[in-house]
Amino acid sequence: MPSQKRRTTKTEKNTRKKTSKKKATGKTSSKSATLFSQREIRNFVIEFTTSWIRGDITIHFPTAAELSKKTPLSIAFPEDPSVNAELKIKEHYIDLLSTCAGIKQASIEEQQQAVSEIFRMLLMFRSANRIEGKIKSNELEKRVEKLEKAVGVLTQQREELAKTLLESKEEPK
């Protein structure tokens, strides 16, 4: 039985051409290998921060008791350094938020660095199960507002229709 030659499709030919061009020019795809763009990270930090400020989520920061377990130096120090560590973690978080929000004077690079640090902290908190609640995205909020307006319009139209129907029944024939 003679062997049949397989036909190449147009897609396979185009793929071969692109691969050949890449090898010839030494260029690879211009797409980034990162999971999230800087814009997506920034949007996530915005949504997270907004949810935290509104009280939709709670961050369980490490407590002094938890921090003291990790530092057996408390015997050597008359004051408990873990209390200061607890406050410093919270202060650092608020400081980063202030930088991102523009409350604290900072360069654009410092603001971008603050966004990156907050994102890393959020990943750390999430991986340690220290975040409780749901992050409500701005898009979801906009959709809810749009639905609320639509319900308001429908309610008004229903009331007008009911009023019109009642008036038509009351009119003498």
Image: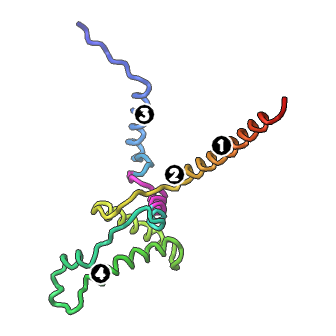
> What is the magenta segment's predominant secondary structure?
helix
Q: Which residues are magenta?
A: 33-47
Q: Is residue 40 magenta?
A: yes
| Label 3 – label 2 distance at C-alpha | 43 Å
Q: Is residue 55 above or below residue 16?
A: below
Q: Is residue 37 above or below residue 21?
A: below
Mark 1 or 4 closer to N-term? 4
In front: label 2 or label 4:
2
In front: label 3 or label 2:
2
Mark 2 or 4 closer to N-term? 4
- Residue at numbered disc 4: 85
Disc number for residue 33: none
Quick one: 156 or 40, which is closer to the camera? 156
- Residue at numbered disc 2: 140
Q: Is residue 7 magenta?
A: no
Quadrant location of the C terminus in the rendered image: top right
Find residue 31 and report its horizontal and vertical position in percent: 44, 48
| Label 1 – label 4 distance at C-alpha | 55 Å
- Residue at numbered disc 1: 154
